[in-house]
Image: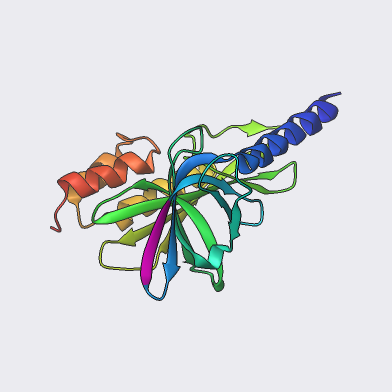
Amino acid sequence: MKIKLQIIFALLSILTIFNSYAQKRKGKITLIEEKKSLSFDGYVKIMANGNILFRETKRESGKEFKKDFIKRIEIYEGKQSGNYEFFKNPEDEKERILLIELAAGNITLFSQTSYGGGSPSFYSLGEPSTFSGTLGGSYMIIDYFVKEKTDSDIEYLTTFTGHKRTKRFFIEMLARFFSDCSDLKQKIKALEFEYDLTKIVNYYNNNCKKD
């Protein structure tokens, strides 16, 4: 019975995620065209294959844009609201990944949330929750990436799953990464921000200068 319930919860989770992909939201897309950026306001649908379906009005059929030609997406409404950007995957430059922006400044923080474990892995849109539990045997995986203001490429920072071992490594890694700000380093070790990387990066951008 327990296994059946886990399977049901996992399937419901996947259906919810795919439904979020299917909905069109009011927003803006920015295209890459000959090193120039062209922006259009309308209705945006992020498709399961990563491409973007764009409509100027809700009723028109819309046009599909391949993700290779999309630079940025802004979604203004719903649970998936936020700023998204496509980048080359640091581990595979042939692949482009869609990340949500969590904090901006001298360091911009991005993330990609997925679920693994008891059900097939799948990706979720929207800002990651700080909840680190499981659902139907699945668990949340948050991959974090950073980009310095002067860089155009992202750098992989860390992965957080909420497991005790991962939490310990997470704090140790952050203390090393932000070692140029001794005040923040101490706050991280004291768990003042708990495991909220968005708050940590915002603090760094607003309060830290290189020691």
Asked if residue 133 lies left or right of residue 101, the reply is right
Give the magenta part as a residue range: 36-40
In the image, residue 150 lies at what x, y percent? 25, 67
Q: Is residue 157 above or below residue 9?
A: below
Horizontal arrangement in the rendering, residue 206 relative to residue 127 (left or right): left
Quadrant including the C terminus: bottom left
- Give the image quarter of residue 193: top left
Residue 39 within the magenta-colored segment of the rendering: yes
Of 62 and 183, nearer the camera is 62
The x and y percentages for residue 56 are: 50, 47
17 lies left or right of 88: right
Above or below residue 177? Residue 165 is: above
Quadrant of the image containing the N terminus: top right
Name the residue nearer the viewer: 69 or 20.
69
User: Where residue 176 sits: x, y (%)?
Assistant: 32, 56
**Magenta span dominant secondary structure:** strand
Q: How is the image coloured?
A: rainbow
Residue 57: percent from left, percent from top: 53, 42
Residue depicted at 67% across the width and 47% down the height? 122
Any part of residue 16 in sight: yes
Q: Residue at x 48, y 68 (%)?
A: 90
Q: From what the image shows, is residue 198 above or below residue 159? A: above
Residue at the spot 38% in from the left edge and 50% down from the top edge: 172
Residue at 46%, 50% (x, y): give it.
111
